[in-house]
Image: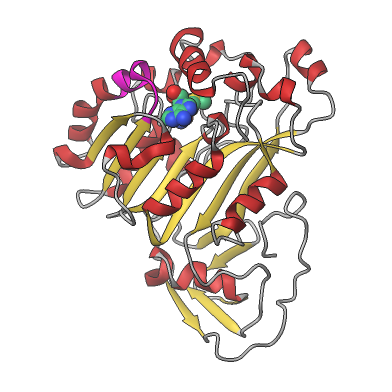
């Protein structure tokens, strides 16, 4: 939704350029991860300089597994924590691009880039940063269908035109590519007063996604199923802000969505089974497509058509054996469709 009076870009520039110097300057915990990251990520963060960790303003750990050889694009990369973390997993044939509105954020990231590129044993061109608004990725020569994975950490809420940003994401993703992002969600549309309050906006609350609008946005882009990887309620510690937003339940959420033509708006049963081979790095025993779909190595699991597609038509295909196709249909998959707000996933069980 567009701000009417508040200039969202200018407010982000002021908030992240002038008001905040490090994470501890935030007034609320909205831009702080609500959930501990997994060990494979903790170990990667431990290899990053203190300054980058101190200037981290994200609300999650939006990095999926299996990054080897991929091109990763981080939208609103700030000082680069997630760029430099992804860089540790893409390897010499991969690439990570960070985009942000602010020189002051990018300057910190660029200062560390040569040193970290060397430390992670990557070619010079593996890490790149670009300045500008996410609403126009074409301006940074990010071409159609050129990116495997788009990540973003507590940024999309700050954008004045979310549908434009989502459309750009879909444009640059390769078929079968993945959007994996953390952001702030709310159980209702916020009042204009809160949406346009500079502090609510800067703290990543004013532009929080309303669940049903998010679902509608994705459905409009032909993504009728997405998966909620984690969600944790956010407490607003600032008394005045808590009073003004009384009744709004904010959450820090991590979402996974794939660019696939074959997704349906319900889980349909085609009698398909998947067997995980145990070959995803850092997941030798269990691979989690989402919290309701944890595939144990060697165990056949029945899945709906959408889950099968998320495995068979993406970079995960090489790690699975998929039995069955969509030639025979057995009706709705045996999980009741729920509202996107209550469900642990966007559509599927
Ligand atoms: C909450 S911080 C998160 C930064 C980073 N992802 C992290 O985890 O540390 C939001 C960042 O998004 C950037 N930003 C806000 N709106 C933007 C836009 N429309 N285009 C590009 N960057 C934007 C800000 O400059 C800031 O660095």
Residue nearest the observer in this picture, 43 or 93: 93
Image: magenta residue range: 100-109
Furthest residue toward left? 124
Q: Quadrant of the C terminus?
A: bottom right
Quadrant for residue 337, please give it: bottom right
Give the vertical position of 261 relative to 240 (above or below). below
Quadrant for residue 306, please give it: bottom right
Left or right placement of residue 281 versus residue 213 in this view? left
Magenta stretch: residue 105 in it? yes
Quadrant for residue 321, please give it: bottom left
| Image coordinates for residue 277, horizontal then vertical, percent | 43, 72
Left or right placement of residue 140 versus residue 311 in this view? left
Residue positioned 48% across, 69% down in the render:
311
| Image coordinates for residue 230, horizontal then vertical, percent | 63, 46
The coloring applied to the image is: secondary structure
Inspect this view and state whether residue 74 appears.
yes
Residue positioned 71% across, 84% down in the render:
331
| Image coordinates for residue 192, horizontal then vertical, percent | 72, 25
Residue nearest the observer in this picture, 102 or 298: 102
Residue positioned 45% across, 55% down in the render:
178
Residue nearest the observer in this picture, 298 or 159: 159
Main secondary-structure element of the magenta-colored stretch: helix
Furthest residue toward bottom? 328
Magenta stretch: residue 66 in it? no
Furthest residue toward top? 18
């Amino acid at each position: 939704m567009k701000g009417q009076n508040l200039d969202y870009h200018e407010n982000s520039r002021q908030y992240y350029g002038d008001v905040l110097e490090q994470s501890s300057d935030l007034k609320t915990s909205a831009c702080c991860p609500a959930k501990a990251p997994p060990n494979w990520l903790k170990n990667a963060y431990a290899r990053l300089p203190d300054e980058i960790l101190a200037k981290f303003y994200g609300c999650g750990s939006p990095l999926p597994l299996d990054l080897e050889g991929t091109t990763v694009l981080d939208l609103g990369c700030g000082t680069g924590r997630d760029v430099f973390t992804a860089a540790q997993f893409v390897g010499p044939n991969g690439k990570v691009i960070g985009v942000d509105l602010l020189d002051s954020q990018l300057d910190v990231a660029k200062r560390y880039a040569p040193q970290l590129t060397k430390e992670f044993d990557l070619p010079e061109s593996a890490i790149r940063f670009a300045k500008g608004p996410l609403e126009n990725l074409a301006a940074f020569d990010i071409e159609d269908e050129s990116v495997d994975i788009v990540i973003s950490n507590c940024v999309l809420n700050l954008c004045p035109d979310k549908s434009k940003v989502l459309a750009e994401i879909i444009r640059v993703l390769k078929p079968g590519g993945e959007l994996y992002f953390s952001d702030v969600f709310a159980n209702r549309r916020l009042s204009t007063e809160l949406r346009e309050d500079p502090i609510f906006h800067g703290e990543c609350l004013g532009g929080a996604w309303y669940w049903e609008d998010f679902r509608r946005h994705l459905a409009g882009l032909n993504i009728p199923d997405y998966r909620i990887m984690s969600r944790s309620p956010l407490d607003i510690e600032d008394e005045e802000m808590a009073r003004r937003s009384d009744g709004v339940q904010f959450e820090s959420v991590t979402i996974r969505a794939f660019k696939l033509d074959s997704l349906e708006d319900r889980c349909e049963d085609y009698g398909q089974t998947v067997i995980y081979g145990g070959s995803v790095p850092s997941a030798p025993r269990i691979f989690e497509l989402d919290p309701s779909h944890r595939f144990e190595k060697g165990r056949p699991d029945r899945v709906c058509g959408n889950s099968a597609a998320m495995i068979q038509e993406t970079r995960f295909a090489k790690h699975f054996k998929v039995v069955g196709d969509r030639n025979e249909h057995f009706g709705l998959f045996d999980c009741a469709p729920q509202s996107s707000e209550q469900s642990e996933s966007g559509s599927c069980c």
